[in-house]
Amino acid sequence: QVQLVESGGGLVQPGGSLTLSCAVSGDTLTYYAIGWFRQAPGKEREGISCISSMTGNIFYADSVKGRFTIVSDVAKNTVYLQMNSLKPEDTAVYYCAAGARATLMGASYDDWGQGTQVTVSS
């Protein structure tokens, strides 16, 4: 079991950028896949990106492909989600989670962070 803490959320204008951080503690990041998920009010949770530091596998949902970039820094035990060209529909609570393999399916992850709010609005 690992602990995850997200940070970096906030209010940004459409077209702007934010970088979210997911700090992992309790074990080495190398052993885990980290996924980023988001949930907007009244909507289902959506898997948006994931990375495996061990295999190098990276996946993106179509909704964020080309705009978001996931990066794993094993030395800092932290995974980042660089978000560019943000749109109002990106507004949601963003969560990171740790699991055994990189997948956009939330049910595959065992440990979750508390979430960070991202609001895209003018």
Image (cartoon, rainbow, N blue to C red):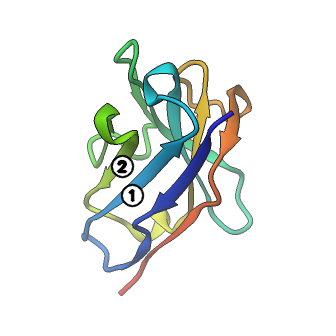
Percent position (x, y) of residue 74?
Answer: 33, 32
Residue, x 41% and y 82% (percent of image)?
Answer: 121
Instruction: Classify mark 1: helix, strand or loop.
Output: strand
Characterize the local packing of mark 2: few (<14), some (14-19) or many (20 or more) Cα atoms within 10 angstroms: many
Quick one: 29 or 122, which is closer to the camera? 29
Callout 2, which amino acid? Leu
Residue, x 68% and y 39% (percent of image)?
Answer: 111
Tell which circle, 1 or 2, labels the residue nearer the N-terminal end. 1
Above-or-below relation of 113 to 29: below
Residue, x 50% and y 58% (percent of image)?
Answer: 6
Above-or-below relation of 14 to 36: below
- Picture mark count: 2
Quick one: 66 or 107, which is closer to the camera? 107
Percent position (x, y) of residue 44?
Answer: 71, 52
Q: Quadrant of the C terminus?
A: bottom left
Left/right of residue 7 with respect to residue 46 in the rendered view: left
Q: Which mark is residue 20?
A: 1
Q: Residue furthest top?
A: 55
Q: Are marks 1 and 2 in contact (CB under 8 Å)?
A: yes
Percent position (x, y) of residue 50?
Answer: 46, 33
Instruction: Classify mark 2: helix, strand or loop.
Output: strand
**How far separated are the C-alphas under marks 1 and 2?**
5 Å
Residue with the mark numbered 2? 81
Quadrant position of residue 21: bottom left
Left/right of residue 109 with respect to residue 37 in the rendered view: right
Q: Which mark is residue 54?
A: none
Callout 1, which amino acid? Leu
